[in-house]
Image: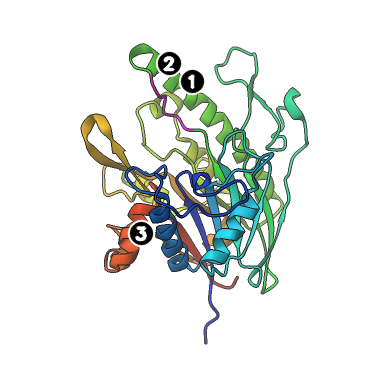
Amino acid sequence: MTPRPLRIATYNVEWFNGLFDDNGRLLADGQPSARYRIDRATQIGALGIVFSALNADAVMVIEAPDTGSRRASVTALEHFARQFGLRTSRAITGFASETEQEISLLYDPDRIEVAHDPQGDPVGKKGSRDAPRFDGTFRYDLDTDAAPDLIRYSKPPLELAIKTARGKALRMIGVHMKSKAPHGVSGPEFVRLSIENRRKHLAQCIWLRARVEAHLAAGDDLIVLGDFNDGPGLDEYEKLFGHSGTEVVMGLDAPAEARLTDPHACMVLRNPMGLAPSTARFWHAPNKRYFEALLDFIMVSPRLAALHPDWRIWHPWNDPACLATPELHQALLEASDHFPVTIDLPGY
């Protein structure tokens, strides 16, 4: 019998934090959730169906429950896993977010061992130009005025060292990049903030790319996954900067041995005017309709790509199995405005 591949997922759960009390217990009641016209019990039930269907060995949860003075992301996620009898019964998180949305990993302890293992120097607010630890400050000149800007992550990437049950070592970085969309403004102010946000987003991606290069130079097998709030050709401001942040992290201008691979991003890059996959579905009130975008990625280093892993977007309309399974189809629509992405790694 062929051994089961290691399945890793990334899933942005819209305002997961709003489904728990301060003790990490689920609020499965009829009160409204952050999902439009969906109550908390319905969203929780939908998430139970989705996580069970994924049957993943590890799920990078984006917008995971909050960690703060009264709340703990790990406690909440492990309560959630127990509620639905998930194999992914353990959780781990890293540096706390400045928001109420963490980046945390829910995983099966029988399949992998996991440790939070941040890289880079702990420079604090004074900053460094040399890709410091992700809870610090990156000094980078965004506008070529010879004065470095101070860049911080509101949601520091989660850096993990992983050992699989087969004895294989992996590095994993979970990300939730800065949103580029301004809110509550219009006209010239909208344009100004759009460009400013894109600059900051790009600087975060350059910082992350420096970490990727260090791992590849060290010969590490690497997975970078999460919500990039970005994608090739996603908006008109990309033309001002030459590349999307996603392309920067993938290293498309680097030699083949220094590039990361994600087939969905590559599909758009090869044919920007052709068919495009999507991982998120948003209601746009002014136009009274839904719009879709490719925002969530699982990028892998060359040695992992050479294994020919299987990527899948669990899209309720575009994935045939999800569409043919009514309960799962409905749950994906109720659970979040993003859809999970998985990768099956053979031999791990």
Count of number-bearing discs: 3
Residue 331 vertical position relative to residue 155 in the rendered view, above or below = below
Residue 109 vertical position relative to residue 123 in the rendered view, above or below = below
Label 2 Cα crowd, 10 Å radius (few <14 / some 14-19 / many 20+)? few
**Which residue shows up at 40% across the image and 13% down it?**
189
Residue 150 vertical position relative to residue 84 in the rendered view, above or below = above
Residue 303: in magenta span: no
Q: Which mark is residue 192?
A: 2
Q: Nearer the viewer, residue 274 or 324?
A: 324
Front: mark 2 or 3: 3
Q: Which residue is mark 3?
A: 331
Tell me how far mark 2 sits from mark 3, CA to CA.
38 Å
Residue 2 lies left or right of residue 280; in this view the side is right
Label 1 Cα crowd, 10 Å radius (few <14 / some 14-19 / many 20+)? some
* Residue type marked 2: Arg
Main secondary structure along the magenta-highlighted residues: loop
